[in-house]
Image (tube, rainbow, N blue to C red):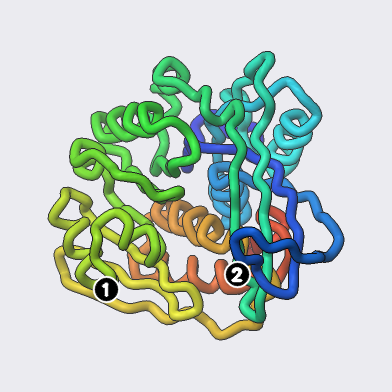
């Protein structure tokens, strides 16, 4: 896959190194807890989704920025080792690569994540213009919000003009302009993000409101309860397989990558969502973000 000239899936997004610490429960504000051993994993929502998509069987290119440091070089080597095209994973001098601090806790292994300011924040409209041809020739474009919004909008506009489906994972959640939402073919928030975007606590109402804002489809992820698709055909619920979670970090990214791969394969949307949920459920039974992403053969 590394030699594919025109990737099926192009991911525009972040790359981080995840520093993970597990606790008996998540701490309260001002509280100090003793945790387990510190672990280090390759992460970042964009890079995670790229790994998920390539393991799902798609040819993938990653568009992002990193620092000229050990963290960045290791991140690039990991993506290249997966068979992901990294020719447009730009190096930014004198800026550190992305770092995410992650706490895991409780019986459900919920997570708290803080992402440091880094080279991810330096991805620019100019960088997107430089990969215009790559975007135009892809089958699907994927983006998140751990890189500047102007870069995301530029990628969405380029995809829209070329008639390429644009998938957006609005995380971390922030107010989004209607001009962007109107270019989104599928918006994929979790329940919390959907509420922050709309003010609606019920997923059905949040999805309907986002649909009215201009999105073609809205898929709201519901954790262990699966996902809810809201589109012109109404509301459809897709259950998730029951599993015992070990680490929930990266589950949403896993789902995004598998959604992109399914759309690139031109599978029916129902089958694409069901397969993505199976992959995401399998990922939470393992530790790490990228390391937990299942391979296509595992879902057979």
Task: Name the residue at 17% across, 48% down.
Answer: 214
Instruction: Please state the horizontal and vertical placement of residue 46, each as a whole percent of the image.
Output: 54, 43
Q: Left or right: where does residue 143 sit relative to residue 95?
A: left
| Residue 259, above or below 179 | below
Quadrant position of the C terminus in the picture: bottom right
Q: Provide the residue designation for mark 1.
A: 202
161, above or below 227, in the image: above
Please give the name of the residue rendered at 55% of the width and 59% of the height, measured from the top-left corner.
254
* Rendering quarter of residue 270: bottom left
Nearer the observer, 69 or 12 = 69
**Total marks drawn?**
2
Q: What residue does disc 2 label?
A: 110
Q: Please report whichever mark, 2 or 1, sits nearer to the chain's N-terminal start.
A: 2
Cα distance in 3D space between marks 2 and 1: 21 Å
Corner quadrant of residue 17: top right
Q: For the residue labelled by badge 1, is the local secondary structure a helix, a strand or a loop?
A: loop
């Amino acid at each position: 896959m590394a030699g594919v000239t025109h990737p099926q899936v192009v991911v525009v997004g972040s790359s981080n190194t995840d520093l993970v610490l597990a606790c008996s429960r998540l701490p309260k504000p001002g509280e100090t807890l003793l945790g387990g051993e510190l672990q280090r994993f390759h992460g970042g929502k964009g890079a995670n989704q790229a790994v998920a998509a390539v393991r799902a069987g798609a040819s993938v290119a990653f568009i992002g920025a990193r620092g000229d440091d050990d963290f960045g070089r290791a991140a690039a080597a990991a993506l290249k080792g997966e068979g992901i095209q990294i020719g447009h994973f730009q190096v930014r001098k004198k800026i550190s690569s992305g770092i995410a601090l992650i706490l895991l806790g409780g019986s459900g292994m919920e997570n708290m994540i803080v992402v440091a300011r880094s080279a991810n924040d330096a991805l620019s409209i100019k960088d997107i213009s430089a990969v215009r041809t790559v975007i135009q020739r892809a089958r699907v474009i994927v983006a998140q919000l751990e890189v500047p919004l102007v870069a995301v909008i530029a990628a969405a506009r380029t995809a829209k003009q070329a008639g390429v489906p644009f998938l957006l994972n609005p995380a971390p959640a922030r107010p989004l302009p209607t001009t962007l939402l109107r270019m989104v073919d599928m918006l994929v928030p979790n329940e919390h993000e959907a509420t922050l975007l709309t003010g609606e606590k019920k997923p059905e109402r949040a999805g309907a409101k986002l649909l009215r804002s201009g999105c073609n489809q809205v898929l709201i992820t519901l954790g262990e309860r699966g996902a809810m698709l809201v589109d012109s055909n109404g509301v459809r619920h897709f259950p998730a397989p029951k599993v015992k979670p070990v680490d929930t970090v990266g589950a949403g990214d896993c789902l995004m990558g598998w959604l992109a791969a399914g759309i690139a394969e031109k599978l029916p949307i129902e089958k694409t969502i069901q397969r993505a949920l199976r992959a995401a459920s399998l990922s939470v039974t393992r530790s790490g973000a990228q390391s937990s992403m299942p391979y296509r053969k595992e879902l057979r």
